[in-house]
Structures are given as C-alpha cells and as structure tokens.
Amino acid sequence: MSASTTKTKNQPSRKPVLLDYLKAFTKDKLIFAARQLCITYSKLKKDELAEKICTEMQKPEIAAKRFAIMPDENIQAFEAALEKKCFHPTYSEYALLLPFISMGYIVSYPDDCFEAVKEARTVYKKINTADFQARRQQLAWLLDCITAMSSLHLILPVEFFCEMYNQKAGFELTPEALPQLLAEVPSNFNPCAIKDGHILLKKNDSDDFYTRLEQGRKPFGLYLPTVKEITMLSHYGYLQSTTAYQDLHDFFTQELNVAALDAHYWCQYIYEFENSNTDGNTSELIQKLQANIPAWNNYSHLSRLSVLLQNARNSATRMFCLGGHTPNETIKLLRDAQQATQQNTRVGAKAKKVYPNDPCPCGSGKKYKKCCGKKH
C-alpha cells in the first residue's frame, strides 16, 4: 500500500470470497498461512491446501484464538471495515487493519482497495460476545505488559509482573492465574516463559545471563512503569510523549526534513540502541543516521544531535540493565541510598549502649566501669 493518507471515495463491493482469494495465493504463501494455523500441509496439493485453510479460518474457535490478542483500536478498525464495501484506508487505518489483512480476513487489490471477505463477517458475528471481548482485553493488556517488560526488565518476579498488570483500572491478575492466561497467547506471539517464580524472555533463557542481570540491577531495585509508559512502549517502542524524545522527533522533522513517520522510526531505533548501550558510546548510532538521512550535514547537525541524544539517554531511556530506571534516576537512587546509610550509621553510633565491662570508648584500653564510667 502507498503511504498516502488521503481518503478516496469508497467503491461498490467487489464481493470477495475467501476461497477464491486463497486459491490466488502462491504455494509458498499458502504454506506460510498453514503454518500459522498449525495445519499439516506436506501431502496436500495447492487447491486442497487452500480449501483446508479456508475451512480452518471459518471455525469460530480458530478465529476467536487469533482475534483474542488484538487491542481495542485494532478490533474497532476491523469492525468498521466489516461495515464498509470496497474502500481505500488511510495510512493509520491500514496499520490497524494489517493483522487482519495478513490473516486473510480482509483482501487487498492492486489499486490499494480493500474489503472484508463475507466469511469474516459470519465468523466474527459468532464469536463477538461479551465474554470474548472481556477476555480479549485481558490478553491484549497482557501483551502490552510483556512488550514493556521486554524493554524495561527482560525478567521479573511473577508477583512484580502482576503488580504491573494490575495498575490498569478494571484488570486483576494473580501469580497463580498468570500461567493460564499466558497459555492462551498463540505461541508465535508469546516470547515469554515462567521459570522459578519469574517471567522471562525465552530468547535470553540462560541462568548465567539472568543471574548477572539481576545482580547488576540489584542496587537500583525494579522500576514500576505507569499505564501510560506501558502503552507507549507497546504501541510506539519508545517513550514517545517525553520531552527528550519529542525534541528528537522535532529535530528530525524540522531540521533534517524527515517525514513524521520516519522520525518515529528513528526515535524508536535510538531508544532501542540506547536501552542496551551500557558504555554510552553513540558513534555507531551517529554513523547510522549519517548514512540514512539525506539532509544530514556534519557541521551543523552533529553538535545539536549529540546534546539531544545525551538528554534522551539520561532522562528518558529506561534501561533493563538498570532495572527499568533511567541513568539520571539511578544517580539519585545511589545518592539517596548513600545518604541514608550515612544517617543510619550516625544514629546507630549515637544510640549504641556501652556496658560496664566493655572497652571504654575514649580509647584508654581500660574497661568502661574503671574509666569514664566512674563519672556516671
């Protein structure tokens, strides 16, 4: 689809039929669809495979499982598409409908026209119940929390993860219920496992890696993100509303003439880079920007960008190696901890009781009762 955001007048229905649409697929594309549905395909001819996929897609239990992880905004866009005939979506509508297009419930034409197949209306009507929508919202929020955890922590005690999940009004999850809810997420959308009382990313499942990570972030504790931060990390891949990243976005659009969507991409790229950039070296990042942004001018842009990058890193990039805190927050945490330790030491020294047979605090070497203790 083109990136145009201009709406074009809707056209009459082209009455797309799911099986006809699937039969137009290449064999490789059908095999990909079969894998998504866990269909055995090795002995099936192309048209047989298309028929098998068509049958599976119309089963309410299959559609319910695939739709169950969709956020509200995607479901709302899909429901709106079901009410339309042939239409030209805006770029934002297209982005929200993309999962359903990929699944085959909405077909696309060479002229960038889209329409839901009639089978999509039928199967959605069967599954669209209050219970389904409630469970879908729970699973969608679970995936939002998993996405945020993947950026902020990589591994969490299940109790802390549930605390994170439960921050959203109307949502409640216990450590005992987490495994069951997680099991309802399709395997290709679930990057997590539960192990030894922790929820963690399977791709990094190394005892040594997670042991070192937990030890390294122990001085800072774990950062509990807000609902807004969880949503931003899930939907944008970075903390989009922070001043530091808004400044970066404005720099790309206003000074480097980068399109707004591309500026979002670069902000997300910078956030991911800095999230795992433990030494603070940005030379590799700057080289990447120089190579990909045509309007780049070394002399006029480098110093400005360096300041913006440093500010974004220190004040608005939450790092998993710091327990989800920003570098600026960890400096304050360590300073506060040091001051508290010093205060406790002073209080402890002042409150310590000296007994008669203890060495005298004056340093004479005598027992307290035979030295300064005589005065009391």
Image (tube, helix red, strand yellow):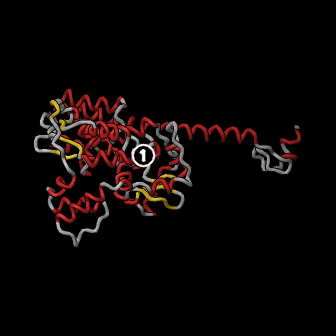
Residue beneath the point at 34% across and 34% down: 240
Q: Position of residue 296 (x, y in %)?
A: 15, 35
Q: In which quadrant of the rendered image does the C terminus lie? A: top right
Q: Classify 10 Å Cα crowding around label 1: few (below 14), some (14-19), many (20 and above).
A: many
Residue beneath the point at 20% across and 46% down: 107
Residue type at the position of mark 1: Arg
Left or right: where 67 falls relative to 195: left
Q: What residue did someone put label 1 on?
A: 136
Q: In which quadrant of the rendered image does the N terminus lie? A: top left
Left or right: where 358 falls relative to 315: right
Q: Position of residue 97 (x, y in %)?
A: 27, 42
Whether residue 139 is situated above or below residue 297 in the rendered picture? below
Whether residue 64 is situated above or below residue 375 in the rendered picture? below
Q: Position of residue 263 (x, y in %)?
A: 23, 35
Residue 257 in sight here: no
The number of callouts visible is 1
Left or right: where 304 falls relative to 171: left
Can you tell which quarter of the image residue 268 is in? top left
Residue 86 in sight here: yes
- Residue 30 or residue 51, whichever sits in front: 51
Can you tell which quarter of the image residue 326 is in? top left
Tell me the SS state at disc 1. Answer: helix
Residue beneath the point at 81% across and 50% down: 358
- Residue 157 or residue 321, whichever sits in front: 157
Q: Position of residue 183 (x, y in %)?
A: 45, 57
Can you tell which quarter of the image residue 31 is in? bottom left
Residue beneath the point at 28% across and 32% down: 248
Q: Residue furthest left?
A: 111
Left or right: where 74 falls relative to 299: right
